[in-house]
């Protein structure tokens, strides 16, 4: 995971933005809506819980689009470029790049359409989704896509076990915060069942269903005594692939 995605404990980063509004500008709502629509039409929902009628959904969108897709686009950005853009600008860049890479639109066509709406912002937008797609979007917002899956095995760790966080090979996308690598912790909860992730991350180790744990860390073990307040505990939900017995 690149530097811009695990800033915990680093100094001299400048002021922190405590903006509390979810959407600061009106256009950001539309970007969130586009992402949600893509999630609701994603081909991966054919195997999702709950079941969605993907075989009969009247959509031309035939790709997988999940939170992992969105995050991979952001994490692939050059760090200095990453800090130039607002939150939903990064979303827009990732979504636009995805549609071009997947062949739904060419780069020139995208540029042309963007220029058209800059000159004519009140021009009619393309057709709205059909009734079945609107119903699917609403259902997806209400029911989502559970990662809970059947799992034939047993969890390797139990509540109270002391563990060390693994240090897997860096990949394009991970769910392991960089500042927890190689750190000691204690399992405080084993979540029932097992959970799959949206994509297989390869050397990072997640994708297929596996147990997930709530792990407690002493802040001093992570950032050192000088950078930590006394008696401070940090909790993280971690896939089993990220945990190992103490060396």
Image (cartoon, rainbow, N blue to C red):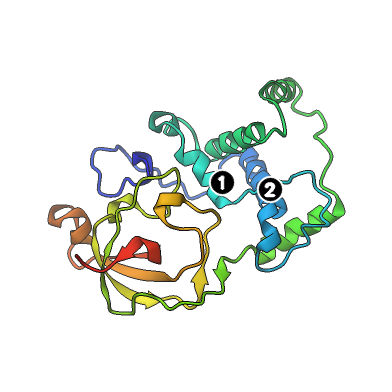
Query: Badge 1: how crowded within 10 Å, few (<14), some, or many (20+)?
Result: some
| Image height of 42 relative to 13, above or below | below
Residue 1 position within the rendered picture, expressed as x and y whole percent measured from the top left: 37, 44
Dot 1 or dot 2: first in sequence order is 2
Q: Is residue 184 visible?
A: yes
> Seen in the image, is 193 located left or right of residue 242?
right
Specify whether residue 22 is in view: no
Q: Mark 2 and mark 1 in contact (Cβ < 8 Å)?
A: no
Q: Residue at x 36, y 45 (%)?
A: 170
Q: CA distance from mark 1 to mark 2?
A: 11 Å
Look at 68% across and 46% down and name the residue there: 63
Q: Nearer the viewer, mark 1 or mark 2?
A: 1
Q: Is residue 68 left or right of residue 186?
A: right
Quarter where residue 96 is shown: top right
**Residue under numbered circle 1:** 69
Callout 2 secondary element: helix
Residue 91 location (% of width, % of height): 56, 40
Point out residue 71 in the picture as x, y percentages from the top left corner.
51, 46
Residue nearest the viewer, comparing 222 with 201: 201
- Disc 1, SS: helix
């Amino acid at each position: 995971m690149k530097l811009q995605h695990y800033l915990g404990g680093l100094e001299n980063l400048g002021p922190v933005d405590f903006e509390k509004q979810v959407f600061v500008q009106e256009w950001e709502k539309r970007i969130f809506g586009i992402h949600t629509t893509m999630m609701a039409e994603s081909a991966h929902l054919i195997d999702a819980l709950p079941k969605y009628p993907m075989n009969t959904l009247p959509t031309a969108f035939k790709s997988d689009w999940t939170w992992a897709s969105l995050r991979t686009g952001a994490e692939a950005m050059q760090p200095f470029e990453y800090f130039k853009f607002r939150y939903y600008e990064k979303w827009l860049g990732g979504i636009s790049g995805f549609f071009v890479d997947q062949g739904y639109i060419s780069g020139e066509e995208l540029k042309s359409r963007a220029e058209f709406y800059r000159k004519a912002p009140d021009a009619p937008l393309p057709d709205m989704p059909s009734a079945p797609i609107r119903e699917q979007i609403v259902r997806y917002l209400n029911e989502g896509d559970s990662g809970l899956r059947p799992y034939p095995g047993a969890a390797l760790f139990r509540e109270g076990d002391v563990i060390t966080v693994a240090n897997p090979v860096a990949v394009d996308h991970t769910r392991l915060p960089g500042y927890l690598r190689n750190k000691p912790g204690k399992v405080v909860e084993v979540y029932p069942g097992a959970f799959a992730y949206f994509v297989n991350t390869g050397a990072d180790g997640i994708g297929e269903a596996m147990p997930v744990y709530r792990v407690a860390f002493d802040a001093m073990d992570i950032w050192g005594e000088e950078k930590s307040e006394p008696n401070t505990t940090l909790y993280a939900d971690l896939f089993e692939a990220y945990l190992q017995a103490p060396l």
